[in-house]
Amino acid sequence: MNEPLRAAVIGAGYWGPNLARNFRTSPHWDLVAVCDLDEAKAAKVVGPRSTVEVMTSTEALLARDDVDAVAIATPASTHAAIAMAALRAGKHVVVEKPIADNSADAQAMVDLADERGLVLMVDHTFCYTPPVLKIRELVADGSLGDVLFIDSVRINLGLVQPDVDVFWDLAPHDLSILDFVLPGGLEPVGIAAQGADPIGAGQTCVGYLTLPLASGAIAHVHVNWLSPTKIRQMVVGGSKQTVVWDDLQPQQRLTVYDRGVELGAEQPDKATTNISYRLGDAWAPALPEREALGAMVAEFAGAIREGRAPRTDGRAGLRVLKVLEAASRSLADGGRLVTGSTVEVSA
Ligand SMILES: NC(=O)c1ccc[n+]([C@@H]2O[C@H](COP(=O)([O-])OP(=O)(O)OC[C@H]3O[C@@H](n4cnc5c(N)ncnc54)[C@H](O)[C@@H]3O)[C@@H](O)[C@H]2O)c1
């Protein structure tokens, strides 16, 4: 029961090596193989004098019976085909974000995993970082009160991608965090996306995503490849407290403000309401410094062992993907608020 599970990593480009390193150092896992179409890339990840095998054929890898699970870190357009083949071969799957490049394929992945009783997980890496786990806890235990607004900024000088726009490149991170921290997950009642390509790169490079929520709250995400300054900040405003996450401040990534606005009694003239401002303390929760992917691979093993859904399961990946698709529709329609059945993201 406590023997390590056996994993293989498919895709040894930029991100795959991080997955391989974490499977290798995890007590829950034994890394059996690294597979890439480019043998040299896989060999580089494995390194010299290693028992980890280098493979170039996904088919041959999936035919092995000494592999319990695979981690897919290939380009998004290939996720569904590889994941479906892995599930058919009886392997548990963790796939990189975004889960697939369209929601029909993602739905098929979720359905097949259910049918086969296999774990399908998405590597929504930020959901395993100490600040995001703390924000989720502060929302869930009522410390923040009702969530009134979320404002997320993820901007820097980014690599302009040939095949995806800035929403598909960067917003999966923000959306997966919203899905993770909001009670009930990411279920906006509408989606509006505005964007621009002011340098003529052929892709939207600056993007603004607005997500009204059923509670009357609103979330906003700003993603941008053209900003010379790097900002990674999220504000979660609550009726009791507000938390500010600045990921570029390792000494104090989170600050909780016991400050806010309160509505008092209606004035006798009934035309105005008394608004008061609460100016309390600010405090910084102590957070451990640890690599998120270590917690992610541990969660993958836990879900397989306990036969339960992982924290960031295929359904979470599908909810994020449906929001991205609705954002693309809104963008193509001049930024109109897309509402109704087209934004139903329940999976
Ligand atoms: N979680 C995160 O924070 C994070 C960060 C970066 C990238 N990613 C995701 O990781 C995935 C990979 O991104 P990347 O930047 O590493 O891409 P990359 O292009 O650097 O690497 C992809 C690798 O996959 C290999 N490959 C392609 N098709 C294959 C197949 N059929 N079988 C085996 N190997 C195949 C390629 O040869 C290449 O080495 C993407 O989905 C991306 O969104 C996630």
Image (tube, helix red, strand yellow):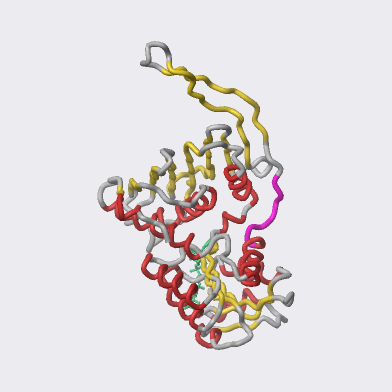
* Residue shown at the point (39%, 45%) measured from the top left: 211
Q: How many marks?
A: 0
Residue 342 placement, left or right of 105: left
* Residue shown at the point (69%, 46%) measured from the top left: 287
Q: Is residue 255 above or below residue 50?
A: above
Residue 196 position in % (x across, y down): 33, 47
Q: Residue furthest left?
A: 333
Q: Quadrant of the C terminus?
A: bottom left
Q: Is residue 271 above or below residue 98?
A: above
Residue nearer the viewer, 227 or 208 = 208
Residue 334 position in % (x across, y down): 26, 47
Q: Quadrant of the N terminus?
A: bottom right
Q: Is residue 308 above or below residue 169?
A: below
Q: Chief secondary structure of the magenta span?
A: loop
Residue 186 position in % (x across, y down): 45, 51
Residue nearer the viewer, 182 or 178 = 182
The answer to whether residue 226 is magenta is no
Q: Which residues are magenta?
A: 287-293
- Kindly indicate the quadrant of the structure image that contains residue 39: bottom right
Q: Residue furthest top?
A: 268
Residue 87 position in % (x across, y down): 50, 78
The answer to whether residue 291 is magenta is yes
Residue nearer the viewer, 55 or 296 = 296
